Image (cartoon, rainbow, N blue to C red):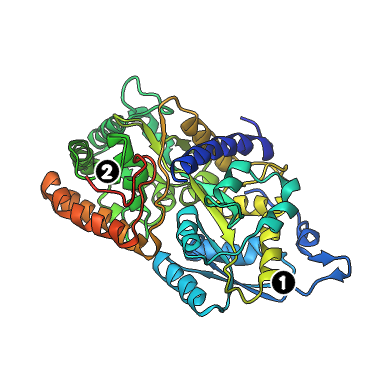
């Protein structure tokens, strides 16, 4: 395993970027050198330093308390201006951006969000063209495919790529002896995960599989990017299909080996560290502390495959400036600062979101991040890889969309109701969400002519 930071993630970054470009076509502890980024953060013109002033940044990313604090105290520490960082869940995030956009003025000058969120804002003309910023950052080698995504089908740069991540699995070393016979940790199936959990339960009497099914967990992303695509090859267009029923039946069978505390878990790193859970699935940023703190006792590995492939969800976050921005000049300086190599390295170290630039980063990749990088590279390069994009165009309906999947989980798995019956009853709710915003299908669903139709 290489130890330099720049090259390993550059490989995985390119793979995820290639995935992202294909999807876009379908949809139209490393320590930074003290003070090293201070010079990069200073805004300078021919007339000398510029007074950046205060910049209010609203973000749907890095919302959890620990991540938000690291953003404020570490990632933004050397910025030459003053930043008020506000993390907000999807609903309040969308509401504030739209409210300020409707009035034509507001406090927020930088928006940090996901590709799908920006697509909705751009459709309503809320975002500023950042082509000049992209030109100034050209020497950093921002991934060209991600830059293309940021144009959102226009000839303008409506957002600048910021950071990227995905979801993988991790296990404690004591779980490894219970792997099913002949299983390859880098090429597991979801059925083998069930068998793995059964083997552990039989040997120890404890349920050691774990999923982030708590209120603050990203459990809905499991269904949207992993469960449904892996078993059906689709998402909305196969929501109530026979293959979807098979996925829910698989999960119902597996749940008998899942730690019952999973319905309280928001981050899987804590139960992995304590040994409460031995095998877990989660976002890379929500597994990293376990891999970082106990690198000799943990292993990271790709998401398993289902009958339709090894589904995974690439996550691309970006930075945009709303047309209503109070301080657009300061906002541009903040975006340039967040893309500097030192800041990208600090972001990786602090919150385990990976770089989007190909310029060499300072420092070495620590063992925990090496483990995640290797898992991501193996997953995205697998012959059966099946990328599934985050929802696009949902706007303020994102929460309602996610809730449909959480309701299905509650009713089928926790309440023990018949899967086919529940899915048929919830299909109308899902269609209503898509109809409300007239959302077209996104991969892995086939391209739609108009609003995506639930089947």
The reply to whether residue 296 is in sight is no
x 31%, y 30%: residue: 308
Task: Name the residue carrying label 1.
Answer: 81
Q: Which quarter of the rendered picture does the N terminus lie within? A: top right
Tag of residue 237: 2
Name the residue at the front extreme. 449
x 35%, y 41%: residue: 226
Give the CA separation, mark 1 to mark 2.
47 Å
Horizontal side of residue 392 vs 41, given as left or right: left
The image shows residue 36 at horizontal and vertical percentages of 78, 56
The image shows residue 330 at horizontal and vertical percentages of 70, 70
Question: Relative to 132, does residue 165 appear above or below in the rendering?
Answer: above
Horizontal side of residue 242 vs 211, given as left or right: left
Name the residue at the right extreme. 47
Question: Relative to 64, does residue 375 appear above or below in the rendering?
Answer: above
- SS class, disc 2: helix
Which label sits in the foreground, 1 or 2?
2
């Amino acid at each position: 395993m290489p130890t330099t930071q720049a090259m390993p993630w550059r490989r995985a970054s390119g793979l995820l970027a290639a995935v992202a470009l294909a999807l876009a076509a379908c949809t139209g502890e490393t320590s930074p050198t003290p003070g090293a980024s201070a010079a990069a953060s200073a805004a300078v013109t021919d007339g000398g330093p510029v007074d950046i002033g205060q910049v209010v940044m609203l973000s749907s990313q890095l919302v959890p308390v620990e991540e938000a604090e690291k953003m404020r105290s570490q990632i933004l520490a050397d910025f030459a201006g003053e930043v008020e960082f506000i993390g907000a869940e999807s609903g309040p995030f969308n509401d504030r951006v739209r409210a300020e956009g409707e009035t034509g003025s507001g406090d927020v000058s930088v928006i940090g969000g996901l590709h799908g969120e920006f697509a909705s804002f751009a459709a309503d003309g809320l975002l500023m063209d950042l082509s000049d910023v992209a030109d100034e950052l050209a020497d950093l080698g921002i991934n060209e495919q991600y830059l293309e995504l940021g144009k959102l089908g226009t000839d303008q740069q409506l957002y600048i790529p910021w950071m990227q991540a995905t979801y993988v699995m991790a296990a404690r070393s004591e779980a490894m002896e219970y792997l099913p016979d002949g299983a390859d940790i880098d090429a597991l199936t979801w059925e083998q995960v069930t068998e793995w959990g059964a083997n552990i339960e039989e040997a120890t009497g404890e349920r050691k599989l774990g999923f982030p099914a708590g209120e603050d967990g990203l459990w809905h992303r499991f269904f949207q990017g992993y469960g449904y695509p892996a078993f059906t090859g689709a998402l909305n267009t196969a929501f109530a299909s026979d293959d979807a029923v098979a996925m829910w039946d698989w999960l119902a069978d597996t749940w008998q080996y899942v730690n019952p505390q999973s319905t309280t878990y928001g981050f899987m790193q804590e139960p992995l560290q304590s040994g409460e859970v031995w095998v877990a699935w989660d976002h890379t940023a929500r597994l990293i502390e376990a891999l970082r703190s106990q690198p000799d006792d943990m292993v990271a590995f790709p998401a398993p495959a289902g009958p339709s492939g090894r589904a995974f969800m690439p996550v691309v976050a970006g930075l945009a400036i709303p047309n209503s921005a109070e301080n657009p000049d300061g906002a541009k300086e903040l975006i340039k600062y967040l893309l500097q190599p030192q800041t990208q390295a600090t972001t990786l170290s602090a919150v385990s979101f990976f770089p989007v630039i190909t310029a060499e980063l300072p420092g070495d990749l620590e063992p925990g991040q090496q483990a995640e990088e290797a898992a991501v590279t193996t997953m995205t390069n697998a012959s059966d890889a099946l990328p599934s994009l985050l929802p696009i165009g949902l706007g303020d309906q994102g929460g309602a969309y996610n809730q449909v999947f959480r309701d299905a989980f509650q009713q089928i798995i926790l309440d023990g109701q018949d899967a086919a019956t529940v899915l048929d009853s919830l299909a109308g709710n899902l269609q209503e969400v898509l109809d409300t915003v007239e959302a077209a299908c996104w991969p892995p669903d086939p391209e739609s002519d108009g609003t995506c139709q639930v089947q």
